[in-house]
Image (cartoon, helix red, strand yellow):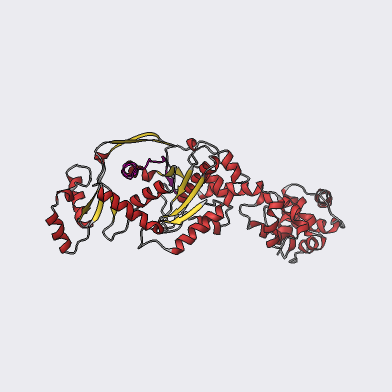
Amino acid sequence: MTVKTRFAPSPTGRLHVGNARTALVNWLYARQSGGLMQLRIDDTDRDRSLDIHVEGILTDLDWLGLAADECFRQTGRADRHAAAFDGLVASGRLYPCFETPEELGIRRKAQLAAGRPPVYDRAALRLTADDRRALEAEGRRPHWRFRLDDRETAWDDMIRGRIEVHAGSLSDPVLIRADGAPTYTLATVVDDAETGVTHVIRGEDHITNTAAQIQLFHALGAGEPRFGHLAWLLDPAGAGLSKRIGSMAVGDLRDDGIEPMAVAAFLARLGTSDAVEPAPDLAALVAGFDITRFGRAAARFDPAELLLLNARQLRLADAAAAAPRLAAIGVPDAMARAFWDAVSGNLERFGDAATWWRVVAGPVDPVILDDDTSRAVLAAARDTLPDEPWGAASWASWTKAVQIRAGVKGKALFRPLRLALTASEHGPELKKLLPMIGRARVLARLCGEAA
């Protein structure tokens, strides 16, 4: 059996990190198993599905490197959904219902008030043919429900172990809306069955759907896939993520300068007991992936923790990998390796490299401290500034000379120099930056001139 997973987002909003984790886990499981991942656009909600969101999903998955092996829209299989509907009607498993959403809402409230579970009471099954004709004459159009067998339905969840659900605790699910469109439940089961999906890995909010879907697989004459349900991701405040309000959107992380591998490495371990570590590439994540490591407890997605991982991810990159991006901010190829070696340990985002390149190439408005000690340090620095060429030892020998001339050491020595040369309190080692800045710019900055 070839393993086939699927990621089936609905294009009703932006892809958030909870969706992205589901896509990543499906991709990792498929790759580790030597199988395939299907991308299925669940666009059966015709009113809210938008092409701009489809494009956004494709862009986000491409940025993360999660290439699907096959891709299609569910609306393109409408004929298959219709054929399944006809077959289920013929077998007596579907029945028409005429209640309006408002009427169903009143019933649910009454059931809850009486201390009963809000399960559909199958009132539509008591309608006669004359009753149905009369309702249709009023202009009502039926929605169609799948009649569940009154039995225990169980599955061995890949993440949660054995789960058993009695159908008596569930409402018969709606498979066809009053406008004739298939619901998620019908479309997803038909597509899973007919396109050979073997493993369904999704969020825990779908656990309540699974028993009904297993019965629907059987009613269609198909075996059910294996199921795995990931615990939810929460935002830092403990609230659930929602694509409809754009929380933690993948596109926002991209725009904020977060590395795609940092996002992937973070999501691959979030919700497991394993330490979150940077990874050189997706292949490394595949090699270390184990779906049974995911726990049942919800995990919090903290952007601050992701930013820390992003900095570690950048330090993992070598100069050759960074070279094309360095060239884009003006770093010459001849200086790329030395520059990356100097600054990579001080980056939170790659975009910070542009700031340090300006320190190297200028212009920088130096910060000159207005106190006697600092003035003495800068005067000594100008007087002892060695001629070029400069190398790795130039900073140490120069600052030693400044220390002797000015009679100061420690912070009183190094702080005025760093502020004058970089206009910043902190940053990369100046022994690495100094040879790239060059004598002319160093001397100008020591004199308080922009250079």
Q: How many marks?
A: 0
Q: Which residue is depicted at the point 61% across and 49% down?
A: 311
| Residue 267 in the image, given as x and y percentages of width and height | 51, 45
**Image-based side of 430 in relation to 270, left or right:** right
Q: Which residue is depicted at the point 67% across and 58% down?
A: 325
Asked if residue 218 lies in the magenta stretch, the reply is yes
Q: Quadrant of residue 202?
A: top left
Whether residue 317 is visible to the viewer of this picture, yes or no, is yes
Q: Nearer the viewer, residue 257 or 1?
A: 1
| Residue 45 in the image, given as x and y percentages of width and height | 36, 59
| Quarter in which the C terminus is drawn | bottom right
**Image-based side of 48 in relation to 2, left or right:** left
Q: Which residues are magenta?
A: 213-235
Q: Quadrant of residue 359?
A: bottom right
| Residue 209 in the image, given as x and y percentages of width and height | 33, 45
Asked if residue 250 lies in the magenta stretch, the reply is no
Question: Hey, which residue is sitting farthest top in the picture?
Answer: 162
Q: Nearer the viewer, residue 438 or 289?
A: 289
